[in-house]
Image (cartoon, rainbow, N blue to C red):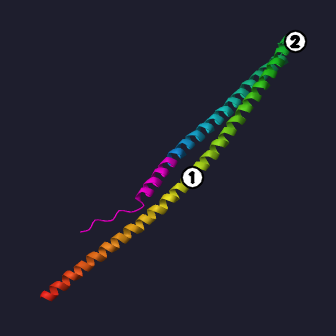
């Protein structure tokens, strides 16, 4: 029984298979980076919300104390300085959110690019796999035809003897 011929593009298929594996790993990395950027943005937004809640509580307490006449002029000056500092903190937190949003946008773009690249590499591999399947089917057809021919010759030889 003759040996099955080896698929001539096997090394290409193996190469493309490795490329798909590499691209899959890169996609996993890109997804992790995007998720980390998403988490960073969420944390920055949460920090700002918490700072706003704290500032609102301080303002409410100051307004209550002012209404009750518990504050003097120096307290009002300190409150104004605190308000200025709180505004600066809110501006810093807003900038942090903007930076996190920018990083998230970049991470999403990178993930989309890697996902597209993976799709292309899978398509390249698919072309070779389909060709290999056609090759294997051709080998099977040739083997089946050869076996059928051998069987017909054996049958014909028996008929001539008999």
Would residue 100 be found to the left or right of residue 114 on screen? right
Would residue 84 be found to the left or right of residue 98 on screen? right
Question: Is residue 72 visible in the rendered structure shown here?
Answer: no
- Magenta extent: 1-23
Which residue is at the front of the view, 64 or 5? Answer: 5
At 33% from the left and 65% from the top, the residue drawn is 5
Q: Residues within 10 Å of mark 1 (few under 14, many from 20)?
A: some
Looking at the image, the residue that sits furthest to the right is 73
For marks 1 and 2 on the same chain, the one whose residue lies earlier in the sequence: 2
Is 40 part of what is drawn in magenta? no
Q: Position of residue 58 (x, y in %)?
A: 76, 21
Q: Is 132 located above or below residue 144 in the figure?
A: above
Q: Position of residue 34 (x, y in %)?
A: 60, 41
At 30% from the left and 74% from the top, the residue drawn is 144
At 85% from the left and 11% from the top, the residue drawn is 74
Which residue is at the front of the view, 39 or 159? Answer: 159
Question: Is residue 92 visible in the rendered structure shown here?
Answer: yes
Instruction: State the image quarter where residue 138 is shown.
Output: bottom left
Q: How many discs appear?
A: 2
Would residue 53 be found to the left or right of residue 23 on screen? right
Of circles 1 and 2, which is in front? 1
Q: Position of residue 157 (x, y in %)?
A: 17, 84
At 49% from the left and 63% from the top, the residue drawn is 127
Task: State the residue position of label 1.
Answer: 117
Task: State the residue position of label 2.
Answer: 73
Q: Position of residue 39 (x, y in %)?
A: 61, 36
Which residue is at the front of the view, 133 or 15? Answer: 15
Q: What secondary structure do most residues of the magenta stretch adopt? A: helix
Looking at the image, the residue that sits furthest to the left is 162
């Amino acid at each position: 029984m003759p040996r099955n011929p080896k698929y001539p593009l096997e090394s290409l298929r193996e190469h493309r298979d490795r490329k798909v594996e590499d691209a899959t790993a890169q996609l996993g990395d890109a997804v992790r980076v995007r998720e980390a950027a998403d988490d960073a943005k969420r944390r920055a937004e949460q920090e700002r919300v918490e700072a706003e809640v704290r500032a609102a509580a301080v303002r409410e307490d100051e307004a209550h104390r002012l209404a009750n006449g518990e504050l003097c002029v120096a307290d009002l000056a300190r409150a104004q300085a605190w308000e200025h500092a709180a505004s600066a903190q809110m501006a810093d937190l807003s900038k942090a959110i903007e930076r996190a949003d920018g990083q998230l946008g970049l991470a999403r773009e990178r993930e989309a690019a890697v996902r597209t690249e993976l799709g292309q590499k899978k398509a390249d591999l698919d072309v070779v796999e389909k060709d290999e399947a056609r090759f294997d089917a051709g080998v099977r057809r040739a083997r089946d035809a050869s076996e059928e021919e051998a069987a017909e010759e054996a049958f014909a030889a028996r008929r001539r003897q008999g």
